[in-house]
Image (spheres, rainbow, N blue to C red):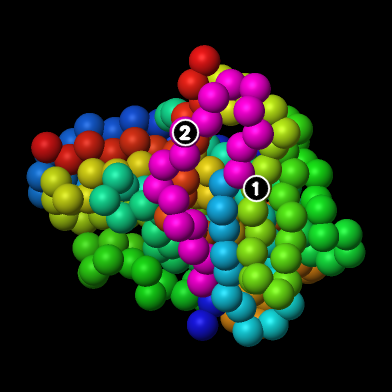
Amino acid sequence: AQSVAQPEDQVNVAEGNPLTVKCTYSVSGNPYLFWYVQYPNRGLQFLLKYITGDNLVKGSYGFEAEFNKSQTSFHLKKPSALVSDSALYFCAVRDMNTGNQFYFGTGTSLTVIP
Amino acid sequence: DAGVIQSPRHEVTEMGQEVTLRCKPISGHDYLFWYRQTMMRGLELLIYFNNNVPIDDSGMPEDRFSAKMPNASFSTLKIQPSEPRDSAVYFCASSLAGTPQETQYFGPGTRLLVL
């Protein structure tokens, strides 16, 4: 079965410190992985994706994510957090073998403390 | 492109009333998704369409919910009759099917409150 797990409901980090938002996945075929961000009262916005190739993917707003096949993880990272990064982050996996559906994690609320 | 357009942005109604939410996907996208987001249940996929045809409606909560896509540029999600537990933010999203690189683009959502 296809699924995505975000083990942390809440992550707090001090401004300027590195941040990590965790995601693990389970798919039957090749994983196509995505990160989205949701600011208050807004829809989800695409951040970055892994399809194939380099395991380190760079995306919008200075975010990056590392694909680790052996650990079935796709953690979101940023070297230096900004207060404006405070938002809800969703990991998603797309399964082309089951109708192109996206499977979203439960979301992780990131708070960057000034 | 204007992105995915949803209307209304906010809806307040009374229990028992019919509610219709509307979505215009990005032009050229052949997949359309309806999601519901609540604090308790997070983001739930309700139904999705491919080329205007419903593919999977297993996420639709019950018969009170129905969705249609009469053409490639318009979809509706209807709740009849509405109940207070339907209060949530409803998102529409669209994407291209062709390759897995294609991401999903979300609308701003409709915030529904059923009193």
Please say whether residue A81 is one of the residues in the magenta stretch: no
Quadrant housing residue A68: bottom right
Q: Distance between the residues labelled 1 and 2?
A: 14 Å
Given residues B57 and B19, the one toward you in this image is B57
Q: Where in the figure is residue B55, as x and y percent of width and height?
A: 52, 75
Residue at x-position 81% and y-position 53% = A56
- Residue A76's tag is 1
Residue found farthest to the top: A114
Chain label for disc 2 = A
Task: Give the residue at mark 2.
Answer: A12
Crowding at mark 1 (Cα within 10 Å: few <14, some 14-19, many 20+):
many
Answer with the quarter of the image where residue A52 lies.
Answer: bottom right
| Residue A92 placement, left or right of A110 | right
Q: Is residue A48 left or right of residue B7?
A: right
Give yes or no for residue A10 being in the magenta stretch. Answer: yes
B62 up-or-down from B19: above or below? below
